[in-house]
Amino acid sequence: MGPALSFLLILGAMSAALPAWAGGEEAANSRVVEAYIEMRTHPGRNYPVFYVAERGETIELLKRRTDWIKVRNHRDIEGWVHVNDIGRTVDASGSPLGLHSPDRESFANRGWEFGFMLGSLDKTDAISAYAGYQFTPNLALEADYTENYGDFSDGRMLSASVVHQMFPQSRYSPFFTLGGGARQTNPRSTLVDTDDRTDGVASVGAGLRIYLTGRLLLRLQYKHYVVMTDRDDDEEAGEWKIGISAFY
């Protein structure tokens, strides 16, 4: 298993474990106001319904896993309820709980974003994983790890970028990036003794996010890199990528 694949698997595990429950670690109480809500044995519609909470029954919201909430009633019966069904309950003040499945509004107001991308870097195959945090509707910070594989050399690059998103409410959301980092190049030559080298990089780029469904989005981007070497001239490289991301 290569370093890039290992990195992506770890990233996927981290993404799946991220909490999406607005209440953090604290449980919240709610009361059923519709006729009933169904509790399932596990988070998923393919699991059986084993209990029905009726109107007026109080349930405690324990934790959230994607679109499912684990709840417990006054008799300590625990089960999983779809997040849309929690909309049939009210809090202690009688206000409906504002929980729902992720949608385009959630995409516009996301906090964390994780994803992986495939493409081409300076005529070599490239794979990358990234994580980003959106701290305003228009601005985000991202960290990106990339590995590329060519006939004459391989490489690794770690970079950070500021991302500006012009239309955060749009399903098709263009963005621009400005960043820098470090790139390690590993020549494959067997005829002469060549050393690996590490150089600083600066980048500018543009791309497009397309909201798909739920927590998923499609991302396309281009970056232009300037590699600041210790030789007479700096090097330049172009990078095209496409990938799938999830937001929280």
Image (tube, rainbow, N blue to C red):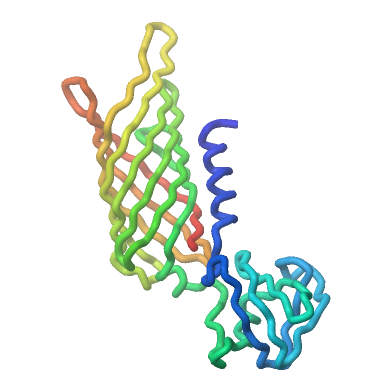
Give the vertical position of 127 relative to 85 (above or below): above
Give the vertical position of 196 relative to 209 (above or below): above
Q: Quadrant of residue 175?
A: bottom left
Identify which residue is drawn at 53% across, 82% down: 98
Is 190 left, or right, of 205 in this rendering? right
Quarter of the figure with the N terminus? top right
User: 40 or 194, which lies in front?
Assistant: 40
Is 137 left, or right, of 202 in this rendering? right
Give the vertical position of 116 relative to 23 (above or below): above
Residue 97 percent location from the top left of the image: 56, 83
Residue 14 percent location from the top left of the image: 55, 50
User: 62 or 96, which lies in front?
Assistant: 62
Is 195 left, or right, of 3 in this rendering? left
Identify which residue is drawn at 49% across, 63% down: 248
User: 81 or 103, which lies in front?
Assistant: 81
Residue 197 percent location from the top left of the image: 33, 21
Residue 26 percent location from the top left of the image: 57, 70
Identify which residue is drawn at 36% across, 12% down: 194
Give the vertical position of 71 relative to 128 (above or below): below
Q: Quadrant of residue 151?
A: top left
Count of numbered circles on the image: 0
Identify which residue is drawn at 38% across, 44% down: 240
